[in-house]
Amino acid sequence: MQIPGNVIATADDLGLKPSVNQAILYCFKQGYINSTSFLTNTIYFEETASLIHENPSINNIGVHINLADGRQAANLPR
């Protein structure tokens, strides 16, 4: 499947959990998507970062800003 050059097909929540990561990797390899957003404040951050480095088909990665769930990303005063 070829995505037209003027279309961004994004899979959300890369890093949420291993099964989501594998589904997104599959979609990249099949050409179903051409972009993803990396949810960086989960317990799977290191595993997901390794997956990205090991699979050049995962490209066009944005940062998924998550303010509601997961680990705190910074020490900010409340």
Image (cartoon, rainbow, N blue to C red):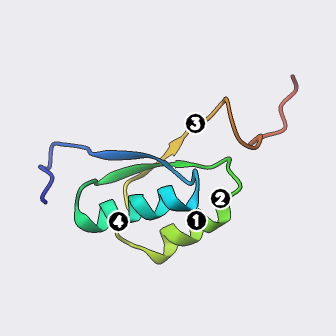
Q: Earlier in the sequence, mark 1 or mark 4?
A: 4
Q: Secondary structure at mark 1?
A: helix
> What crowding class fits label 4: few (fewer than 14 Cα within 10 Å), some (14-19), or many (20 or more)?
some
Disc number lying in front (1 or 4): 4
Q: Residue lying furthest right in this view?
A: 77
Of the two numbered discs 4 and 2 in the rendering, the one whose residue sits closer to the viewer: 4
The amino acid sitting under disc 2 is Phe
Q: Check whether the beta carbons of the residues at disc 2 and disc 3 lie within 8 A of each other.
A: no
Mark 3, residues whose alpha carbon is within 10 Å: few (<14), some, or many (≥20)?
few
Rendered location of residue 53, percent (x, y): 50, 72
Tag 1 and tag 2, C-beta contact below 8 Å: yes
Residue 10, x across and y down, in percent:
34, 45
Name the residue tied to disc 4.
26
Which mark identifies residue 45? Answer: 2
Secondary structure at numbered mark 2: helix
Q: Nearer the viewer, residue 31 or 73?
A: 31
Tell me how far mark 1 sits from mark 4, CA to CA: 16 Å
Say what secondary structure mark 3 lies in.
loop
The answer for how far apart the CA atoms under marks 1 and 3 are is 16 Å
21 lies left or right of 70: left
Which numbered disc covers residue 65? Answer: 3
Residue at x 62% of width, y 49% of height: 40
The residue lying furthest to the front in this view is: 19
Mark 4 vs mark 3: give the one in front: 4
Report the residue marked by disc 1.
Answer: 49
Question: Answer yes or no: do the residues labelled 1 and 3 have beta carbons within 8 Å?
Answer: no
Tell me which numbered mark, 4 or 3, is placed earlier along the sequence.
4
Crowding near pointer 1: few (<14 within 10 Å), some, many (20+)? some
Whole-Å distance between the Cαs marked 1 and 2? 6 Å
Disc 2 and disc 3: Cα gap in Å? 14 Å
